[in-house]
Image: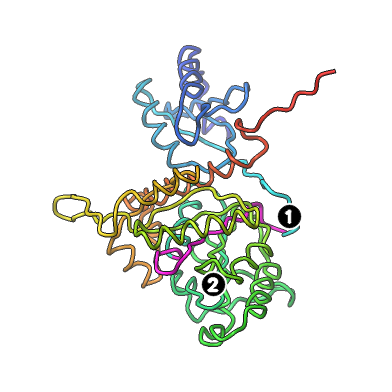
Amino acid sequence: MFSKLFSSKTISTDIQQILVDALKKYRSENFPQGLLFSEVCPEMLLEKDNRIVIKFSLPFPCAGELEVLSDVLSKQIKQTVIFDIDFNIQAVRNHKLAGIKNIIAIASGKGGVGKSTTAVNIAYALIAEGSSVAILDADIYGPSIPTLLGLNGQKPSSVDGKLLTPIDANGLSAMSLGFLVDENDATVWRGPMASRAFSQLLNETDWQGIDYLIVDMPPGTGDIQLTLSQQVPVAASVIITTPQDIALADAIKGIAMFEQVKVPVLGIIENMSYHQCENCGHHSHLFGEGGGERVANKYLTPLLGQLPLEFSIRFDADNGVSPLIKDNTSNISQQYRKIARNIAAQLYLQLDARSPNTANIIVED
């Protein structure tokens, strides 16, 4: 089989050196020290059709960035270059939840900023970038994940009568209280009951092989949000805001809440950042401009991305469809994928012991 796939010819030493040098010298926001995290050279294979396949391992999903780089390298050596990458994603925090590596909370200080829609599209974007993802609806009082995934009326099953099997939504494993009870029943629950229900959803679901569990937090920074943040072994959080002053003020409260429970904030996503005219492409900043960046700079946290106010996002959400399922190469899908890469990269760079940003401790005699 191997001989059928790959050529008996070898790649010239000069071409190999050009490619290795390019990988070492490559710099981006997510790869501040290049693509090769060790001195081990990547494996290079020549396919029968004369394409060069570069194989090595990376610690977070970034398929979209590699697609762009492969085009650049192909033009540089005038020969097709493709990547075959093993995304070796590891847990950055120790916890006892089986089947899950990293838990990322998506939160907002207030409602109406598109948090749940953004959470769903980030989840699908992480899948498109090369990882295994699940989403957990922590908005006990107003679960919207079933609607956003087009799963209203679905009920989870159980293989052993003890653990619930998450519902598959186009490759995304999903669990929500909305799958189990009528939405109107949950809205009248008291805080302790809601917290208990969420804890059961998290701990009594049969998660399997999940690199990233996206938790769609309820809006606000009150007792229920604090309780959930303390109950869940969250690796890190992401704050969703809009450019409006009132939303920014609540985003700051969200940052303060996570600081209180010692959960790192990976960065801020500014939703509804601008409206782009379909005819001329002009950007209109309907809710203000630059607010997310100002908050990010003030609190020394990255601005992970700015998403447009776009009719198609609202329309798809109402119809239970993600733009990444329809076409993960579309313009809006590429924006979500870039944000997803930024989230995965920041989780690694800020918190993973393998990160080149992690200080080395040298003990001298």
The reply to whether discs 1 and 2 touch (Cβ–Cβ < 8 Å) is no
Residue 115 falls left or right of residue 288 = right
The quadrant the N terminus occupies is: top right
Residue shown at 40% from the left, 64% from the top? 113
Tag 1 residue: 95
**Picture coordinates of residue 154, whole percent (x, y):** 53, 78
The quadrant the C terminus occupies is: top right
254 or 132: which is nearer to us? 254
Going by the numbered disc 2, the residue's amino acid type is Asp
Q: Residue furthest right?
A: 365
Tag 2 residue: 139
Q: Start and end of the magenta stretch?
A: 98-116
Q: Residues within 10 Å of mark 2 (few under 14, many from 20)?
A: many
Please report whichever mark, 1 or 2, sits nearer to the chain's N-terminal start: 1
Residue 38 falls left or right of residue 47 = right
Q: Secondary structure at mark 1?
A: loop
335 or 257: which is nearer to us? 257
Q: What numbered label is drawn on residue 300?
A: none
Q: Quick check: 73 above or below 347?
A: above
**Picture coordinates of residue 24, whole percent (x, y):** 51, 22
Q: Residue 72: name its quadrant.
A: top left
**Picture coordinates of residue 23, whole percent (x, y):** 49, 24
Q: Secondary structure at mark 2?
A: loop
